[in-house]
Amino acid sequence: MPAPQCASCHAARAALRRPRSGQALCGACFCTAFEAEVLHTVLAGRLLPPGAVVAVGASGGKDSTVLAHVLRELAPRLGVSLRLVAVDEGIGGYRDAALAAVRRQAARWDLPLTVVAYADLFGGWTMDAVARSTAGSGRSRACCTFCGVLRRRALEEGARLVGATHIVTGHNADDMAETVLMNFLRGDAGRLARGGGLGSRGEGGALPRCRPLQLASQKEVVLYAHFRRLDYFSEECVYAPEAFRGHARHLLKLLEAARPSAALDLVHSAERLALAPAARPPPPGACSRCGALASRALCQACALLDGLQRGRPRLAIGKGRGGRDEEGSSGPPPPPPSDPGSAPGPAAGGCGAACKERCE
Amino acid sequence: MCQVGEDYGDPAPEGPPPPPRPGLRSRELKCVKCKEGVPVVVIRAGDAFCRDCFRAFYVHKFRAVLGKNRLIFPGEKGLSRDSAKRLRFVPGVIYVDEGAACGQSPEDRAKTVAEMKLVLQTLGFPWHIVALEEVFGLSPSVLRCSAREPVGAVGTYKVAVDSFLQQQHTLGTERAGGSPSPTQGEERLSPPGTQESQDPAGPPPAAQTEALSRLFGSVKTLTAKEEFLHTLRTHLILHVARTHGYSKVMTGDSCTRLAIKLMTSLALGRGAFLAWDTGFSDERHGDVVVVRPMRDHTLKEVAFYNRLFAVPSVFTPAIDTKAPEKASVHRLMEGFLLRLQAQFPSTVSTVYRTSEKLVKAPRDGCAAGPRCLLCMCTLDVDAAGLCGGGGAPASGRRGPGPSGSSGFLCLQTVPRLSGPRPPVSPRRSPPPRGLGLEHPRRWAAPRTAARGPGPAGGKARPVLSPRPAPRSCAGRRVALPGPGRGGQVQLCSRREDSRARVIEQLCYGCRANMKDVVSGSRPRVVTGEVHPRGSVPHGPSPTAVLSVAALLGPPATLHLGRGPAPQPKVPASHTAGGAPFVCVCVLWGGGEGPSGPLHLAAGSQRVASPRASQEIQEYLVENGAEETHTAES
């Protein structure tokens, strides 16, 4: 059966059927539509005001590559200037290749690139070192916890370094949908209340963050990269088992097969959830050590680093484990039960997204 | 964070795993409650109950839920699917025969109904058996959503209980000599009036059955079918409840079912309505409240209760019987949760507990607006179709601005209007001018954002107010050259129009379902018309009336509406081809005063600035894709 005609230009053969509308489009029309939608997301949500200096979290993966490309196309119209910020977690054999991809992109698109390294920011702790340190605990998944929290901090530092006023990350609709499914399956009302929206406004001194691709499904992101012939790095992190997210991801794939717009429907749902006021986390305070946004006395990054320095890496992880008392002995308010000590800040899809390797 | 998530969410088994069965037998465990009975069922890990204790536990749970929520006043009538013992309200039982939707043969249906009747007769409650076909006969007056009853406060509840007890006491003393105390399971309160049991008046007309199965045949996916069936069933039950004076409808959803339903609703985009869909009580219909008193029982408890106490049951195929698991979101979610539950025994209760933290109020800043025509929930898409109305500029903690996101989604979700393709491709005849005015509309789904306030009181009534200008598609196409074509074009655009108008009065989830309803270019369209509140200047009841009409087979036309009977807007030429109107459902009316819930404060919910739309249009025009997003293209 020949492909139908493109519903937009009526000239070329359609190359895909869009999940959200079922529209059959050719590659060129799809790319234009995709860009227009990102533009719309940014404009309608007033995510990036004209004149903003935008730090694009670049990992070399598909999402950040597409994000950087689209924003570069739209930059003149939006009146923003772009800086690529990449984080070097110090994962041997994985990050080097990804960073090479980022460097190629930066050179091709003529965008300034800054690389910040865990080793420099966090007193010599690379992810490999963290992994060695946590290996004894028997749960290697802990790596993602450290990496997500620290990367978030590193990106913030990198953005400040380049004088950015806004941070954008490449989370797509599927990421958000997985996160909301996960949060329901584990009953995380606090994070459900916090999630939704397209980003955080940047309260408490943190830079505003947003996710312009949040309404684009993963399939469309990949196809956009395909049609624009973007060069990206697609290997999974060596430390990424992602057990629980795996369940949610598998479910999401099945749901998408039954109803193509499932990911978008889930994002819509997540935005419209009405949580009881009691379930909402209290407004965050500031970390007593670094001043970053924190829901406890120490922000999660400082708490994790603290644990690493003292040789007790599992200190800040988990709920109700030993260690919280030591850490909180300076008299912080006990954390709310719904908040299992997540990444600081009310935004960015909570920790669920932060743990993702691609949380640039 | 995975770590954190794991620790937090990975449901750890509660307590030690149950001892293996041989051990259980050998150690001669006793019931954990009475310490003497022989345990017959292990409810939670480690808790083995004997038969009697299980029964007490089960019944107590039921009572506790009712007592805790204090919603059902003594002496009230409730329409229930369960038998309940010694209740202080008057239950009736309803069975909806959905055979037509599930493809059962008339013989099978008759057999099922007969079996059902047998079961119901032994219950001793008034009962009602209705066929789903009766939705065709629903009249708006009984379906109208009447003014909301105030939910009983604690004080009133106590007063009601006291007076009820007093009354019972008097009754009891009067009867003291004559009647023995009622046997278990029999209602002391006899329902007022005659026995209301309702025999189905024979099988429903074959034409209606055919219409119904055609209707379901025109729904493409099982997901949408299930949702559609649920909608129709709900409306029918409410109808029966209203006509017989029941104030509550009870459903037997267990905790497990509700967890599944919660996740399903979530995946269908109904996030805003989760508390209505799965909470203890559902007041969205106003005068009749849907109650879920079994929500603390797990599926296992229900199953064992039914088995241990030989609760009679009738097996009927459902709409998803024999469907593969991948066929619908419902089935997928059910399978997923039950499998996860087997692995992590606290999955269901975790999801269920989360559902209790949801509230019915829409997210801050979103006032009670218009309701969805199908599910009667407050619309979760914004008037302009562009912005998240729920996003609410007021909510400070939510990201940068009210997030044009959802609106954007909804724009994408508006189904393509079915109907023949315009004879001339729009690209070859671009609209000569007027870009500025028309373009926002394209982005904003069929409803134009640029339209000024409606005539009535400055309220913009995008759908309903007289249009200041013809819709762009119609206007443009009519202007096309070509004699003899104009008429057809006009017709098609009118039909698109009415469908679009129905769709824009649906919530996000229902819109997504409607996308699955129609089959491509065939004129088998679910369409409808919307009569504005207030379009009848001093009508008897300024109620918006919808008739979602399906162009199906037989001319079983009926109209739902008050005031002037709505004229079918489908032109004669379309119905002449053997496809007249059948109205399927339903009316929508608010009870919130003459101004009605349909009003949309002009501009207050707009988020996408004109600048946004303008710029996007420029972008599209520059890139030669200005037609990409028109819903009509």
Image: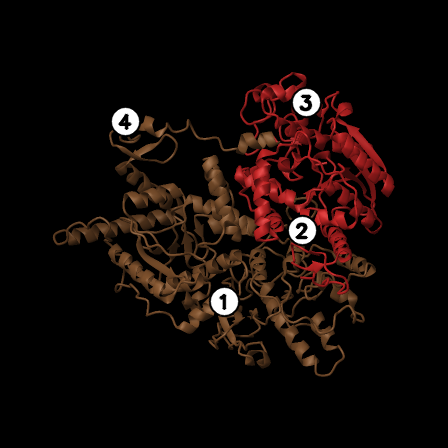
Chain colours: A red, B brown
B33, B77: nearer the viewer: B33
Whether residue B469 is situated above or below residue A319 in the rendered picture:
below
Q: Residue B405 carries which label?
A: 2
Q: Where is residue B94 in the image (x, y as percent from the top left)?
A: 35, 59
Which residue type does callout 2 highlight? Ser
Q: Where is residue B96 in the image (x, y as percent from the top left)?
A: 38, 61
Q: Mark 4 lies on which chain?
A: B
Q: Specify the quadrant that holds the C terminus of chain B.
A: bottom right
Whether residue B190 is situated above or below residue A356 in the rendered picture:
below
Q: Mark 2 lies on which chain?
A: B
- Which residue matches tag 3? A130
Q: Do labels 3 and 1 share a chain?
A: no
A97, A172: nearer the viewer: A97
What whole-number distance in Å separates the C-alpha atoms at marks 4 and 3? Answer: 51 Å
Q: Which of marks 1 and 2 is nearer the N terminus?
A: 1
What whole-number distance in Å separates the C-alpha atoms at marks 1 and 2? Answer: 33 Å
Q: Residue B215 carries which label?
A: 1
Which residue corresponds to the image point at 61% horizontal and 53% vertical from the top-left?
Answer: A260
Q: In which quarter of the image is residue B511?
A: bottom right
Q: Do labels 1 and 4 share a chain?
A: yes
Q: Which chain carries label 3?
A: A
What whole-number distance in Å separates the C-alpha atoms at marks 2 and 3? Answer: 38 Å
| Residue A337 appears anywhere in the view | no
Which residue corresponds to the image point at 37% horizontal and 28% vertical from the top-left?
Answer: B20
Residue that extends furthest to the bottom in the rendered view of this protein: B483
- Which residue matches tag 4? B28
